[in-house]
Image (spheres, helix red, strand yellow):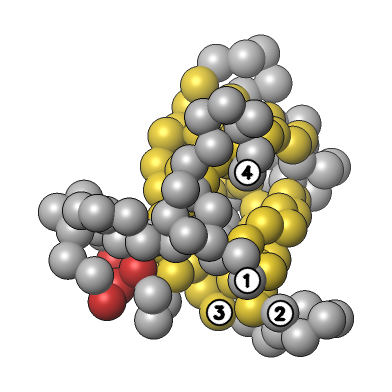
Amino acid sequence: GTPLLVTGVVLNADCVPLSGARVDFWQADGAGEYDNSGFQLRGHQFTDELGRYQLETVIPGVYPGRSPHIHVKVFANDGREILTTQLYLTGISDQIADAIFDAALLAQDEAPDADGHRHVSFNFIVVE
């Protein structure tokens, strides 16, 4: 698929960055297919001391009935799940009818990354 950089910060309800939060991501590939045998395009990372995360992935493709999206779960340091959501991409996700689509979850476009690939950001505000 087409490379995509997703960056952002995980913050608590008081807008304090959460370091060490686990952020899980999973998505379809550029053709709109989920890999349910090798589990490509699934994984997690931990936020740094400033609550930041950085995901290098691909732009998810379209599959029947859904606009392209990236699934996200955020877990507190003690392992509690504190957020389940999806991220959408302006100019892609908002062009396809989808009853689940929420424009509030559109990632913000940023300047392209060092290789000229699309870069978007999204900050997660969670209730612990």
Q: Which quarter of the picture shows residue 56?
A: bottom right
Q: Nearer the viewer, mark 2 or mark 3?
A: 2
Q: Position of residue 52 (x, y in %)?
A: 74, 51
Tell me whether circle 4 and circle 1 mark residues in contact (CB < 8 Å). Answer: no
Residue 65 vs 19, above or below: the answer is below
Characterize the local packing of mark 3: few (<14), some (14-19) or many (20 or more) Cα atoms within 10 angstroms: some
Residue indicated by mark 1: 2
Q: Earlier in the sequence, mark 1 or mark 3?
A: 1
- The residue nearer to you, when weighing 99 against 54, is 99
Residue indicated by mark 4: 41
Characterize the local packing of mark 1: few (<14), some (14-19) or many (20 or more) Cα atoms within 10 angstroms: few
Residue 5 vs 25, above or below: the answer is below
Secondary element under disc 3, as helix, strand or loop, is strand
In the image, what residue occupies the spot 84% across and 42% down? 49
Q: CA distance from mark 1 to mark 3?
A: 15 Å
In the image, what residue occupies the spot 43% across and 55% down? 32
In the image, what residue occupies the spot 48% across and 60% down? 31
Q: CA distance from mark 3 to mark 4?
A: 21 Å
Secondary element under disc 2, as helix, strand or loop, is loop
Q: Nearer the viewer, mark 3 or mark 4?
A: 4
Q: As shown in the figure, which amino acid type bears the numbered disc 1?
A: Thr
Q: Earlier in the sequence, mark 3 or mark 4?
A: 4
Q: CA distance from mark 4 to mark 1?
A: 13 Å
Q: As shown in the figure, which amino acid type bears the numbered disc 2?
A: His
Horizontal side of residue 4 vs 102, given as left or right: right
Residue indicated by mark 2: 117
Q: CA distance from mark 2 to mark 3?
A: 11 Å
Secondary element under disc 4, as helix, strand or loop, is loop
Q: As shown in the figure, which amino acid type bears the numbered disc 3?
A: Asp
Q: CA distance from mark 4 to mark 2?
A: 18 Å
Residue indicated by mark 3: 109
